[in-house]
Amino acid sequence: AEAKTMLDKAVAYYKEHGRKDALEAFTKRKAPFSDRTLYVFCIGPDKKLVADGEYREYIGQSADLIKDASGRMLGQAMLDAAAGPGEIHYSWFNPATKLIEPKMAYLTKVETDVCGVGVYDPN
């Protein structure tokens, strides 16, 4: 529920403040767009990561290069998920536990970008 709420806040902020301000806010690693292991990320129309509240070093890289812990390519899968059903499941490094854990991300298209918030699966 927290991840969905954060994504809803991010979408509202993006629509109210515009793309430039929103992407900057999402990358600052501060509330309300970053909290513990929850953070907003966005993929631009050129398929490059344009915002990331945790892994800033990925900004500017092609989403096609992002792989989960099992080697599964995530970029196109995330773009496809934004069109529906709006979520994707994968394995990712959890910076809090330092372990590879199951994760899911909620994704949505906002103007020209696809934005999402991931949450580690407690099950």
Image (cartoon, grey):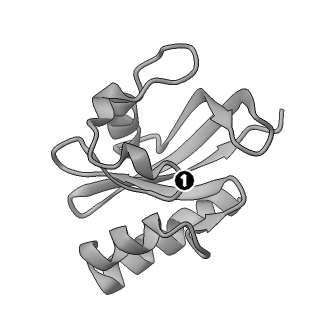
Q: Is residue 13 left or right of residue 118?
A: left
Kind of residue sitting beneath label 1: Glu
Q: Which quadrant of the figure contains the N terminus?
A: bottom right
Image position, residue 3 (x, y; %): 64, 57
- Give the farthest residue toward the left: 46
User: Where residue 45 sits in the image (x, y, percent)?
Assistant: 18, 49
Return the residue at label 1: 54
Q: Which residue is drawn at 27% across and 79% down?
A: 18
In the figure, 48 relative to 100: above or below? below
Q: Circle 1 sits in a helix, a strand or a loop, which is it?
A: loop
Which of 99/78 is in front? 99
At label 1, counting other C-alpha atoms closer than 10 Å, the crowd grade (few under 14, some 14-19, many 20 or more) is many
Residue at 40%, 21% (x, y): give it: 73
Residue at x 35%, y 68% (from the top left corner): 23
* Residue at 48%, 70% in the rendered image: 28
Residue 60 in the image: state x and y as whole percent: 26, 47
Say above or below: 88 vs 50. Answer: above
Q: Report the side of 35 relative to 41 (left or right).
A: right
> Which residue is most to the front?
57
Q: Is 81 drawn above or below residue 108 in the view shown?
A: above
Q: In this view, does 46 lie to the left or right of 103?
A: left
Q: In the rendering, at what x and y percent does residue 92 appear?
A: 61, 30
